[in-house]
Image (spheres, coloured by chain):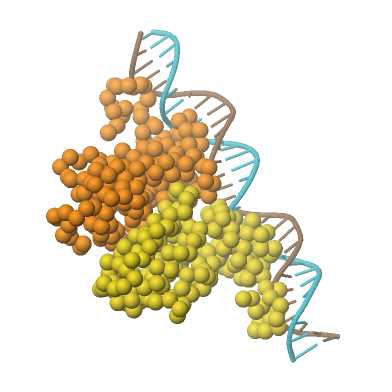
Chain colours: A orange, B yellow, C brown, D cyan
DNA sequence: CGTTAAGTACACCGAATCGTGTGCCTAAGG
DNA sequence: CCTTAGGCACACGATTCGGTGTACTTAACG
């Protein structure tokens, strides 16, 4: 995962401060929230001098944005690549992945300014993700792919937000809804008897 | 609404500082976020001396909690009382009300500590609201009222969170899903041809 | 009238915020 | 070897944060 840490590859000079900063930030932002995490605490957690921190990132805002940028290749996207699943199964597989509060929602709520780079990024990500759902819906033969994709995206965000408030996992509820929507949107087919759970 | 403000009723002494504080807080918390709103700015906006502020509320935490407590009698609950609607229509009417980011979700995301009074309050509110949806679902004759109520609640939270991230209204998407769910959960009936919009 | 409670004005506190300036060190690369 | 870039330690600064202490004014009630 960190090819800079020990291997003499790429710009092999440093001791990999940048990577440590980003991963520490992602963790702290997730566990404590963005606003509740100070730059001092952050540099301590990353075992990086504060000076180095500011040599890599112009400021906290930029650091936040960079953290969000690195989240994409995390977990979800690979679901869309799974060839062992039918398009229909792929749409539902997204609702099997349990996760803490979506960092993009967190950023959008914690940061008031809609023009903040992190919020623009969050918006872009959500749009891109919905687009992927729409594509899958189209592949699956949905009657109205745009609508189904947008609907599934809303379900995911709902589960994420609601889980945070209730302190309880609510993904199963979203999955049940998704099953209904997919059944309704796809032309009648065998296997429609999918578990509503 | 404010019987203290001018009328010589109750503890009719003060000039109604408390009410001004709360309504100013609700507005600022909504517009700027909780963490981005300082007590100084708040006392200025409420046209109340900072000292008075702290004579009414032991601290910011308590003020936040009180603000959330006052949100309930706002808009939504009255939908459940509308006798001119069928139970079924009542379930769907909830999705007609456009609003900014739900303050309870906002608090749950902005405040890291799950034991914070405001977060406990948010949880309680969401549970109570879902319970009311469940009741309406039962009245409407849903096959599984608990499930339908919980599902509709998730849709509302999803629309709220997603609207914040996308900077776009997404309630219509949630309403469309709700229509499908209600149609599926209620025993076949005339009028099932409700607009999916 | 006088009492009393509500509100005011303003300075002040320690702690935390993001961010810098300075000088030194150390390891990788040629 | 020496150069050089990445990193470090640490003090500092300006601002803001939530919250207080003190002494004063005002208005309602009896």
Instruction: Name the residue: 29% across, 42% down.
Output: A135
Q: Between B180 and B115, which is closer to the camera in this rendering?
A: B180
Residue A82 visible in rendering: yes
Instruction: Name the residue: 30% across, 60% down.
Output: A170
Instruction: Name the residue: 27% across, 47% down.
Output: A137
Residue B37 lies in quadrant: bottom right
Check the image and report above or below for A27 versus B102: above
Residue A50 visible in rendering: no
- Indicate left or right for A128 with D21 as reference: left
**Quarter holding the N terminus of chain A?**
top left
**Quarter holding the C terminus of chain A?**
bottom left
Check the image and report above or below for A81 versus B177: above
Instruction: Name the residue: 58% across, 61% down.
Output: B27
Check the image and report above or below for A182 versus B189: above
Check the image and report above or below for B56 versus A109: below
Residue B81 at x, y = what percent?
46, 78
Q: Between B81 and B172, which is closer to the camera in this rendering?
A: B172
Residue A111 at x, y = what percent?
50, 48
Q: Between B82 and B122, which is closer to the camera in this rendering?
A: B82
- Indicate left or right for A63 with B192 as reference: right
Residue A110 at x, y = what percent?
48, 51
Residue D18 lies in quadrant: bottom right
Furthest residue toward left: A190
- Indicate left or right for B28 with C10 as reference: left
Q: Between B171 and B3, which is closer to the camera in this rendering?
A: B171
Residue B67 at x, y = what percent?
54, 67
């Amino acid at each position: 995962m960190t090819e800079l840490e020990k291997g003499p590859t790429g710009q092999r000079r440093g001791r990999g401060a940048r990577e440590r900063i980003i991963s520490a930030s992602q963790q702290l932002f997730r566990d404590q929230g963005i606003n509740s995490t100070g730059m001092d605490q952050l540099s301590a957690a990353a075992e990086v001098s504060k000076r180095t921190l500011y040599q890599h990132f112009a400021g906290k805002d930029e650091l936040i944005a960079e953290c969000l940028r690195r989240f994409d290749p995390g977990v979800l996207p690979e679901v869309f690549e799974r060839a062992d699943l039918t398009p229909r199964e792929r749409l539902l597989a997204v609702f099997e992945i349990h996760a803490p509060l979506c960092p993009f929602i967190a950023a959008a709520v914690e940061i008031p300014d809609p023009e903040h780079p992190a919020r623009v990024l969050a918006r872009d990500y959500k749009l891109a993700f919905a687009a992927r759902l729409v594509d899958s819906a189209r592949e699956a033969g949905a009657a109205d792919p745009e609508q189904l994709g947008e609907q599934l995206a809303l379900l995911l965000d709902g589960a994420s937000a609601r889980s945070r408030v209730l302190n309880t996992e609510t993904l199963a509820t979203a999955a049940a809804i998704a099953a209904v929507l997919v059944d309704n949107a796809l032309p009648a087919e065998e296997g429609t008897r999918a578990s509503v759970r």
